[in-house]
């Protein structure tokens, strides 16, 4: 299997090759990965436990935001002419 650099060389050697947006994004991604690797920076290790904890925090935050939005809408509707009783 070819790595990104070999694949890019194979593609660019073709005379009919036209660089696409996907190629450009992949090239930038590879450069950034190499830059981070050279600096010795590694990504955040994700384990099933840490992922589950993150997922729960994300769900709770989303539910809290939705509840705030609903509460704000309910507060807006209070007060009118009393027609909401029907």
Image (cartoon, rainbow, N blue to C red):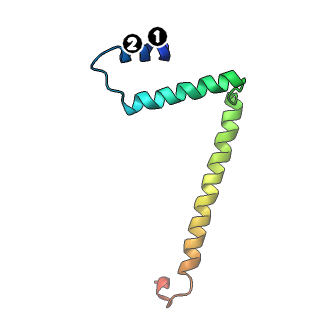
Dot 1 lies on which element?
A: loop
Name the quadrant of the C terminus.
bottom left
2 and 1 marks in contact (CB < 8 Å): yes
Identify the residue position indicated by label 1 in the image.
2
Say above or below: 19 vs 3: below
Q: Is residue 54 above or below residue 77?
A: above
Q: How many marks?
A: 2
Mark whose residue sits in front, 2 or 1 = 2
x and y percentages locating residue 38 in the rendered image: 68, 21
> What residue is shown at x 41% (from left), y 30% (from top)?
22
Which residue, as the protein is rendered here, is positioned at the far left? 16
Q: Position of residue 74 (x, y in %)?
A: 56, 74
Q: Quadrant of residue 31?
A: top right
Q: Nearer the viewer, residue 3 or 16?
A: 16
Q: Is residue 39 left or right of residue 10?
A: right
Q: Residue at x 32, y 26 (%)?
A: 18
Label 2: how many residues lie within 10 Å, few (<14), some (14-19) or many (20+)?
few
Q: Is residue 45 left or right of residue 65?
A: right
| Nearest to N terminus: mark 2 or mark 1 | 1
At 69% from the left and 30% from the top, the residue drawn is 44
Query: Which percent across, then down, holds residue 35?
Result: 63, 26
Which label belongs to residue 26? none
**Residue at the spot of label 2:** 10
Q: Badge 1, how many Cα within 10 Å: few under 14, some, many 20+?
A: few
Under circle 2, the secondary element is helix
């Amino acid at each position: 299997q070819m790595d990104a650099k070999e694949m890019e060389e194979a593609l660019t050697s073709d005379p009919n090759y036209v660089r696409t947006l996907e190629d450009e994004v992949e090239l930038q991604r590879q450069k950034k990965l190499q830059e981070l690797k050279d600096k010795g920076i590694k990504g955040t290790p994700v384990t099933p436990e840490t992922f589950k904890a993150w997922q729960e925090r994300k769900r709770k935050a989303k539910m809290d935001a939705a509840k705030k939005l609903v509460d704000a809408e309910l507060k807006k509707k209070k007060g009118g002419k009393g027609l909401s009783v029907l």
